[in-house]
Image (tube, grey):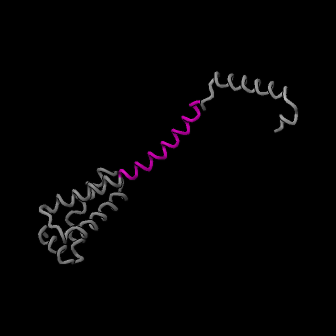
Amino acid sequence: MDDSMIIDMYWNRNENEIEETNKKYGSYCFCIANNILNSKEDSDECVNDTWLRVWNIIPPKMPDRFRIFLAKITRNLAFDRYKSKHTAKRSGEICYILDELSECISDGNTTDNEVDMKLLAESINSFLKTVSERDRTV
């Protein structure tokens, strides 16, 4: 079946057009998706999503070259799926890396700060020894 007949079936909302599109271009679209995703399951889902997207697009739009039209949709869906899978992995890795870095980074207490804090505590304690017990508790 040629492309114009398949497109006419989409325009007429004939449900057989998905089957015909899959017969003619299923392996082509699968190959495009699989080259990007390297996963049979994800590539199959991507091809099925392509058929749904074509079903929703064609009545208002008329593609000039059906094969290229399908390839573009499949490629974009595969890239979207690839990005979403790798972004999720990356966010988990970032949390892990930040946890490791938190052990290496100081909490802001330097030796100078610790010495200053110790001297301040000694000064306050020596002052408190000079005042009455009632004033100290207040």
Q: 76 or 133: nearer the eye?
A: 133
Residue visible at 33% across and 58% down?
A: 43
Report whether 20 appears left or right of 90.
left
Q: Identify the main secondary structure in magenta.
A: helix
Residue visible at 18% across and 60% down?
A: 69
Residue 85 inside the magenta-drawn segment = yes
Q: 138 or 4: nearer the eye?
A: 138
Residue 44 inside the magenta-drawn segment = no
Residue visible at 57% across and 35% down?
A: 102
State which quarter of the image contains the N terminus: bottom left
Quarter of the figure with residue 31: bottom left
Residue visible at 84% across and 35% down?
A: 135
Query: Where does the magenta region start and end?
Result: 82-106
Residue 18 in the image, given as x and y percentages of width and height: 24, 71
State which quarter of the image contains the C terminus: top right
Residue 48 in the image, given as x and y percentages of width and height: 31, 65
Quarter of the figure with residue 16: bottom left
Q: 91 or 138: nearer the eye?
A: 138
